[in-house]
């Protein structure tokens, strides 16, 4: 049975007794909002230190504006940001972004109809809070590029060379009768899965066999139509974020299916998708070391590392015509601007987009000698 508004931790009806007359209404409602937000964050098992930090930030913003949340505007956020980055001790970009996100999360809580705070403000003050934090006025968007410049996607030729080399290691170990054949097969499949589902290293290392499931919308992929990522990158103080990644590459399904069917059974009945010979779980350090060995053997640039596979996933999906918002959801980014940082489309792709745009404008090619 779904919860009714007022029964959810942090809702106005649980914090403010209906009909109560407050001696100082604005201050009283604001304090109640903070109490409600604290209760809501506790129900999400956030760390006490994270909750306290967010509350301090919201109070700091309130003192700066000298207004309560139901009168905040986007201009207030921009003025506050200017102050934070000015003076003799300007704050770091990441700190400013953290402050802005705290304000944004507080407002998301207030405007969520399930908690009833907007209705409470309308009743008491004839106005209500609105979200003032947007991509266009937050640090995540105003900085042109905050990623490390050396992080770039693989070219398609580099990617193919990596996968071919990984497969060659399996064949080589088999020819030599080496014990490491299964491990080489496992690692070759692991790199393909990181790329084909756009994973971070930790997300991949933490995968279990049961994380692959069917997707009714894509029956052609069978049991591997969807991947449940349970260890996504978390906001500080929060538990790991979960997301479902829809399968889009048929060749990757063949690779993981062959591994699960022919290789994984030799490692026993454990839950881990990528176990070691001692039944432990492959760790991020192993992924890094194995990748470095392959990169050096191929003579690829040192700037490439396993996370570049995730950048490649984003870039190649965009180049192949997938909707940017779909790609954003696939990789679990809250903001489209973050996904944009991952994208490094090729000049060929840019020229194809240009040609398509020009062809849609100019129906006929200009004749020789014609002034364009």
Image: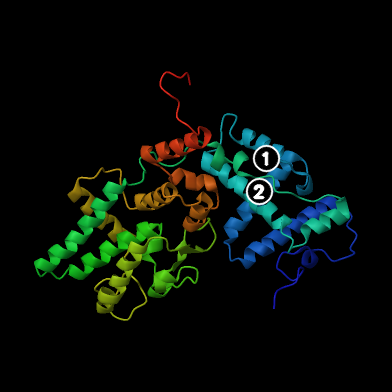
- Toward the bottom, the furthest residue is 269
Q: Mark 2 highlights which residue?
A: 103
Quarter of image, res 17:
bottom right
Residue 148 appears at what percent x and percent y? 40, 41
Q: Residues within 10 Å of mark 1 (few under 14, many from 20)?
A: many
Residue 106 in sight from this viewpoint: yes
Which of disc 1 and disc 2 is earlier in sequence?
Answer: 1
SS label for mark 2: helix
**For the residue carrying disc 2, how many other residues have a C-alpha within 10 Å: few (<14), some (14-19), or many (20+)?**
many
Side (left or right) of 224 relative to 21: left
Residue linked to disc 1: 77
Q: Secondary structure at mark 1?
A: helix
Q: Is residue 33 left or right of residue 44?
A: right
Q: Quadrant of the N terminus?
A: bottom right
Q: How many numbered discs sit on the rendered protein?
A: 2
Q: Residue at x 81, y 51 (%)?
A: 27
- Residue 278 placement (x, y as % from top left): 25, 74
Q: Disc 2 vs disc 1: Cβ atoms closer than 8 Å?
A: yes
Q: Residue at x 70, y 74 (%)?
A: 2
Task: Depth check: give the residue in front, 238 or 195.
Answer: 195
Camera-side residue: 319 or 100?
319
What's the residue at 74%, 61% (across, down)? Answer: 113
Res. 281 in view: no
The percent position of residue 252, horizontal first and vertical second, equals: 34, 63
């Amino acid at each position: 049975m779904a919860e009714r508004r007022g029964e959810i931790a942090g809702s106005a009806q649980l914090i403010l007794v209906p009909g109560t007359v407050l001696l100082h209404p604005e201050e009283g409602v604001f304090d109640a909002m903070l109490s409600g937000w604290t209760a809501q964050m506790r129900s999400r098992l956030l760390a006490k230190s994270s909750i306290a930090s967010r509350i301090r930030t919201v109070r700091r913003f309130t003192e700066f504006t000298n207004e309560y949340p139901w009168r905040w505007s986007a201009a207030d956020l921009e003025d506050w940001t200017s102050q934070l980055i000015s003076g003799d001790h300007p704050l770091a970009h990441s700190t400013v972004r953290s402050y802005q996100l705290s304000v944004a999360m507080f407002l998301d809580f207030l405007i969520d109809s399930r908690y009833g705070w907007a209705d409470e403000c309308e009743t008491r003050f004839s106005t209500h809070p609105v979200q003032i934090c947007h991509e266009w006025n937050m640090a995540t968007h105003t900085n042109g590029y905050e990623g490390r410049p050396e992080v770039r996607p693989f070219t398609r030729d580099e990617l193919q060379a990596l996968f071919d080399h990984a497969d060659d290691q399996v064949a080589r170990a088999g020819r030599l009768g080496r014990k490491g054949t299964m491990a080489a097969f496992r690692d070759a499949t692991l790199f393909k899965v990181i790329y084909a589902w756009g994973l971070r290293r930790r997300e991949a290392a933490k995968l279990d066999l049961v994380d692959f499931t069917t997707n009714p919308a894509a029956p052609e992929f069978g049991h591997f139509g969807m991947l449940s990522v349970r260890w996504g990158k978390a906001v500080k103080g929060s538990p790991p974020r979960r997301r479902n990644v829809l399968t889009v590459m048929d060749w990757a399904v063949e690779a993981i299916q062959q591994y699960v069917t022919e290789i994984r059974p030799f490692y026993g009945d454990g839950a881990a998708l990528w176990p070691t010979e001692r039944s432990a779980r492959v760790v991020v350090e192993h992924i890094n070391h194995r990748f470095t060995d392959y990169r050096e053997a191929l003579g690829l640039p040192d700037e490439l590392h396993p996370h570049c596979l995730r950048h490649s996933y984003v870039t190649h999906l965009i180049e192949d015509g997938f909707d940017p918002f779909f790609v954003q959801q696939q990789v679990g980014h809250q903001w489209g601007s973050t996904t944009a940082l991952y994208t490094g489309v090729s000049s060929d792709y840019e020229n194809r987009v240009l040609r398509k745009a020009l062809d849609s404008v100019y129906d006929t090619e200009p004749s020789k000698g014609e002034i364009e």
